[in-house]
Image: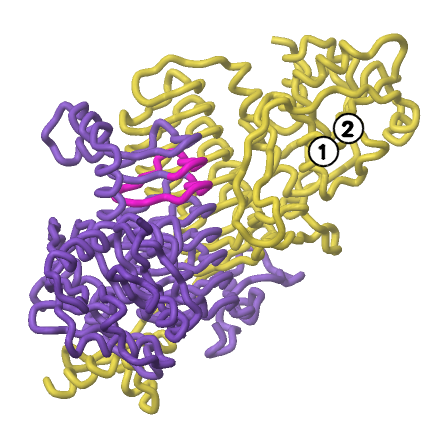
Chain colours: A purple, B yellow
Amino acid sequence: MSRPKAFILPTATRIAPFGDPVSEAYFTDETVRASQLRALRYAGFEPVAPASVAEAIAAAQAETQPMLFLLDRVFLTEKAARDFAKQARKKKRLPAALALPINASVEYTLPLQDVLVDHHRVVHDVVLTDAAHLPPPDADAVAWIRRFREDALFVDVLMREVVIEAPLPVIGERKGAVLRYPLTSTLVVSIEHWTHILWLNQIAFGVRWIELMRRRPLWAAWRAATAFSLDAERILMRLVSKGRNVRVHPTATLMGSIIGDNVTIGPHVTVKNSIVGAGTTLLDHSALVNSVVGQNNLITENTFMVSTVTYPDATVGNYKLQVSLIGRGAYVNAWAGFVDAKFVGQVAVAHKGGLASTERQFLGSVVGHRARVAAKVLIHPGREIPNDALIVMRPDEVVSTIPADLVPDRPMVRDGGTLVPLGTEKKGNP
Amino acid sequence: MVPFQQMAVIETGACIEPFLDPVGQLPLLGLSFHQLAEQEVAASGVDPRRIIRADYAIATAALIKELADRAQGGGPWRLTVPADSALGQLSPGRSEQAQAGTLPFDVFLDAPVGAGLEELRQRAKPVLVSGPARLFRRELARLGPPPHHQDLPDDDRIAAHVEHWMHLLWLGPLLVPALRRRRGTTWRRGQIHRSWVAKSAKIHPTAYVEDSVVEADVQIGAGCSIRQSYLGPGSRLGDFTKVVRSVMGPATHTLADGTFMYVVSLGEGTLTNLLMRDVLIGRRVFLTTGVIFWADDLGREIFVDQRGARLGSGRRVLGGAVGHGSVLGARTIVAPGVALPNRTTVVMRRDEGVTKIENVPPGTPLCWDDARLVPYAQLRADHVPDEIASILEDSRANR
């Protein structure tokens, strides 16, 4: 008997500033589409990607088994897909829509998602149905799939999560907030904004680790047991999954991380709760904390990255790059400053032609594909640096020519790209 | 010890800008360049009287020995390496480039005393010796066309001409393996690996030293990391200083948490910096934390000045040079490849430092303007970004 079909319906969703179709959005070491296909196959479906709703309906009408419809922008994990299919079949009522109770992992990525919030749950554009319940065609896949909602049964996917609470910095006299970081392998996210790629990858660590332990339980148990300690930090130092041909300097510290093939980790590097893509090089004294680094990245000396995500082929050298998303082949140098906190209120981002709140006080920015941020500049939180942007120093800020008549020991200052005697600089010209 | 001054040196009068010192007098690895070259000849076991070299040329003991071993019959002979050797990376800026697949050096064997440099170049028969056998791969930013790495020599088989400040910068760290090999490995408690450490050096137990030479009376603070580097006599490294593939000349003092990679300091300076890469620092230089030597040009080759002309360095990563006795204050930002003359003093612009703070109600957002902190609303009344709007509203309400 053939597998039931899962129709991935195309939307026009493109993620700014990258301009990529949503299916090419990045999730740990693969695209969202690759993750989707893997999850659907794991759940027992045969994924199909029709060019339009009409094509999907035509194909679906020939199906005898219940089938799945979802939008191309819906990311779901293997466990979420499988548990939904299992629970929806048990209910024996079609159509059935995927719902998740609002908990820490749902809340983490919820802002800016166009999903139905129904009391204490979120209903996603994922529907199990049969040929008898198909709505009439609609050119808009989003509108079409939402017609199911009118008489669909909302099936809550059971999920387990561990929530790690971390205090957020206190700004001024306000009460300190707490970041609730979820560890779960049941995730469904409608990816509609760059922040979703960032947030999804930030919590990807839990997904990937749980998947890994499910596939290699004996390995995980052996590694944890041979820590010979009940101390969580010591156990985490043992729980490091390394690919082939990984070179790690003896002074490097790795904790609870997933390291891809052919990665080079230099002296005094720290990698904690992070995922490092294949072929990446981490140079001396760099540190990754809760970050996802794509394939073939170069992380230069002294770089410190926290909760940051990079696409493949990026070069990052920065003292403190936090809560930011770096595009494919992008370059961020040591001196660029990404402001990642707002003193008052929440960080707003560009979305659907206006500004929308991310409901976060802490958020960096996104750097487009192949963009190069090569200047000592400060970027406000939540900003989008376009693809191929090139940000360089103002020429008058950098000393590039030396005056021929420079007098030894006479105090000079920067002015107009050269050095002039102190007191003769032009006002307002840095 | 074999006495120096037995090897003939052809004085060309070469001076290295921006220092203006005769090349033979430039300090490197605790000696003058001239003494260093003599030391290598002495260590080779070859009779120093058989060697003649130009004042800007140097070859390590391993290459000199191989030159003598391979030269059969009457001289004069000239040291050459294959042009595709890693030593070729030191050749941009040389007055004589590779020819016929070989890279020649002005180091001669069995040459007549009194012969001029041009005459020797014409007469001497090339002896091809092998270049460095072990290479170190330096990863570069994924910018510009590949390759995004550079394979640098990583053993004791080095020869170079020092005709430009960038040669001194490149040569210094490359000579450390030869020196370390000659000195041997010292056993010391702590995290010290494959290094020679003088008895009088004081190293904090939390410091890490690897493949380095640490001279007498050096003090290394807590949490420091020294790799593939040379620390000259009397140097003091503040806590958490990181030194990688660098040469710190005698009595160099680094303040806490400085990072120096591929840096050569000629000594006696006080240095601190968040990240300094590929910079040559003269004697008695004072450098503050905020100084930036821009070291890359977005994947393009960096150009330097050579006697008034622009010269391609062949490198995508190159900082600059700082003349002797210079004092560089906060926010000095220097373009790649720029050399600051001796005794350059750069201070902060008067309008950049805050010298006056307006008397305003508490909570009023202030920003920097022309040496003052002024209320934001006063500065840019017509433009209020979203980030500041709510703060301004709160401030007005409180008032």
Residue positioned 60% across, 35% down in the render: B151
Residue placed under numbered mark 1 in the picture: B161
Going by the numbered disc 2, the residue's amino acid type is Phe
- Residue B281: x, y in percent? 53, 43
Density class for disc 2 (Cα within 10 Å; few <14, some 14-19, many ≥20) is: many
Q: Is residue B124 left or right of residue B33?
A: right
Question: Earlier along the polypeptide chain: callout 2 or callout 1?
Answer: 2
**Magenta stretch: includes residue B293:** no
Residue positioned 14% across, 62% down in the render: A100
Per the rendering, the mark at residue A50 is: none
- The stretch in magenta equals A260-283
Q: Is residue A331 left or right of residue B80?
A: left
Q: Provide the secondary structure element on which disc 2 rests.
A: strand
**In this view, B28 is above or below A421:** above
Q: CA distance from mark 2 to mark 1?
A: 7 Å
User: Looking at the image, which is closer to me, A98 or B171?
Assistant: A98
Residue positioned 21% across, 56% down in the render: A187
Q: Is residue A301 left or right of residue B116?
A: left
When asked about the image quadrant of residue A110, the answer is bottom left
Pointer 2 with pointer 1, Cβ within 8 A: yes
- Residue B320: x, y in percent? 57, 50
- Residue A379: x, y in percent? 37, 68
Pointer 1 indicates a residue of which chain? B
User: Looking at the image, which is closer to me, B267 or A312?
Assistant: A312
User: Looking at the image, which is closer to me, B287 or B398?
Assistant: B398
Q: Provide the secondary structure element on which disc 1 rests.
A: strand
Residue placed under numbered mark 2 in the picture: B105
- Report if residue A168 is visible in the image: no
When asked about the image quadrant of residue A101, the answer is bottom left
Going by the numbered disc 1, the residue's amino acid type is His
